[in-house]
Amino acid sequence: MPLYDQVMEAVALVRARTPLRPAVALILGSGLGGLANEILDVTAIAYEEIPHFARSTVPGHVGRLLLGTLSGVPVVVMQGRFHLYEGYAPQVLTFPVRVMSALGAHTLLVSNAAGAINPTYRPGDFMLIADHLNLPGLAGANPLLGPNDERLGPRFPPLAKAYDAHLRYLAREVGGAIADLKLHEGIYAMVSGPSFESSAELRFLRTAGADAVGMSTAPEVVVARHMGMRVLGISLLTNMATGVEDENVSHEEVLSVADEASQRFGGLMLGILRGM
């Protein structure tokens, strides 16, 4: 079945469950799914019920598509995402972005948990993504590989200004009014995972200009821009990715920091939605 037809089949299932037409799509990263509890008049659909959706297999990713309102804005929310390291092709893990756009969402707010490479960052800080280094994409794992369907987007979408400057300005205004919230702006590097980076790899990423590193987001942003969506990306910095050989990072540590920062993250996202 052509990709466009798969998207329309998934859209039909969602529209059969709720009449809501979302304006904004959100993807909630590792440990950040608690914001979903703030959604009003919510309709929850498990991923396994939606045609052609993959299954979320990572702790901290619930695996539901939620539709309702946040700060008075109609939204569609991925409570948990998919990753390359789960074995999914880029086209599969980005499929929900196409569905959310086809449902009516014109803007994507995407979050993730990331390791801080910039030595001035600290765990618990946030980073607005100004640009990204999509290492899997540069190596061939691009979600736009294969035949292009003009109904979904152009053959060669530009990514030079993938992260919307106006939305970043709004996020800085909102973040400045939240107590104990440190908000940086920098470059996000995506690697495939699931192993955390070696010391040499982190030195390479630092030299390449990366301020933070994670295992998601870039493919979703590529597809969002292909669909013509505006994008705002926010990383929660959960650990220092310094490359010091005696330092160990665990997924449990990531989830622990995300849980501690969840209230500040919720305040930031709700404020951004109000400002939109």
Image (tube, rainbow, N blue to C red):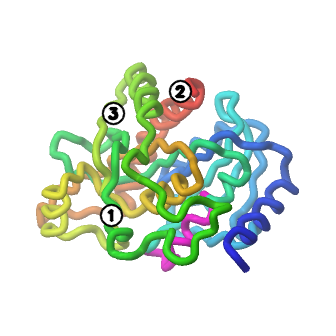
Q: Secondary structure at mark 2?
A: helix
User: Which range of residues does the magenta coloring cover?
Assistant: 85-97
Q: Label 2 crowding class (10 Å Cα cut-off): few <14, some 14-19, many 20+?
A: many
Q: Nearer the viewer, mark 1 or mark 3?
A: 3
Name the residue located 22 percent from the left edge and 56 percent from the top edge.
241
Of marks 2 and 1, the one in the foreground: 2
Disc 1 and disc 3: Cα gap in Å? 24 Å
**Residue 81 lies in quadrant:** bottom right
The image quadrant of residue 226 is bottom right
For disc 1, the marked residue is 250
Q: Amino acid at mark 2?
A: Gly
Going from N to C along the chain, the mark reached first, 2 or 3, is 3
- Give 249 or 147, whichever is nearer the viewer: 147
Residue that numbered label 3 is attached to: 183
Q: What residue is pinned by disc 2?
A: 271
Q: Amino acid at mark 1?
A: Ser
Q: How many residues crowd mark 1 within 10 Å: few (<14), some (14–19), many (20+)?
A: few
